[in-house]
Image (cartoon, helix red, strand yellow):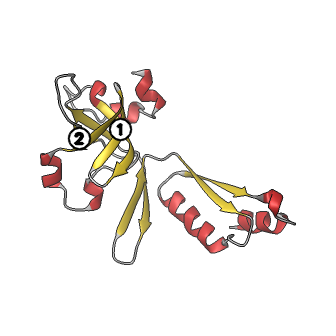
Amino acid sequence: MDSHLQTYGFSPFFAAALAPGESPDFAARIIQEHKEAYLVAAKPGHIWAEISGKLRHHGAVRADFPAVGDWVLLRGLSDKHDGPAQITRILPRKTTLVRRLPADEQLLATNVDLAFLGSSLNDNFNLRRLERYLTLARESHALPVVLLTKADLCPDPQPFISQSHAV
């Protein structure tokens, strides 16, 4: 397996999702999303990609389109190709980090193994928010890691630590 791909988290799980004839050389990880443009980490480096017409046509809901963390297959990586690469397929997702809204779901990220949940130990500390983030991480099957920051600015961080641990 290509060490460049492994750096970005390509694992046997994703390799097994490749169809016969599909090469990991055309796999890339979505690292940024900007409306309909995606910055991907691919074998040639960080490049811009867009959704192919076929993928766009078959997409019905937000989850049918790439999100940050997705592994995708690209077309148009050759030197002779002008313009951004084309995303032709999204590989199966190992995990999905989804924010549930009253009328819909917001796909935040995919294929997340660890979810770092940061909270400041000042007036902005909100135990209910931390609880919602912990639930969101656990529902996605990501391992949540709570980071309590600005302890040096807090006269007594112990109550915050105790409350966070209890949640």
Could you tell whether 15 is left or right of 137 in the image?
left
Residues at circles 2 and 1 in contact by the CB criterion of under 8 Å: yes
Q: Residue at x 79, y 58 (%)?
A: 151
Q: Quadrant of the C terminus?
A: bottom right
Residue 34, placed above or below residue 46: below
Residue 66, image x, y percentages: 30, 49
**Residue type at mark 2?**
Ile
Residue 123, image x, y percentages: 72, 73
Q: Quadrant of residue 73?
A: top left
Residue 137 versus residue 106: which sits nearer the camera? 106
Could you tell whether 81 is left or right of 16 in the image?
left
Q: Residues within 10 Å of mark 2 (few under 14, many from 20)?
A: many
**What residue does disc 2 label?**
87
Q: How many dots with numbers?
A: 2
Residue 156 versus residue 167: which sits nearer the camera? 156
Q: Which residue is drawn at 42% across and 32% down?
A: 11
Could you tell whether 152 is left or right of 148 in the image?
right
- Label 1: element kind: strand
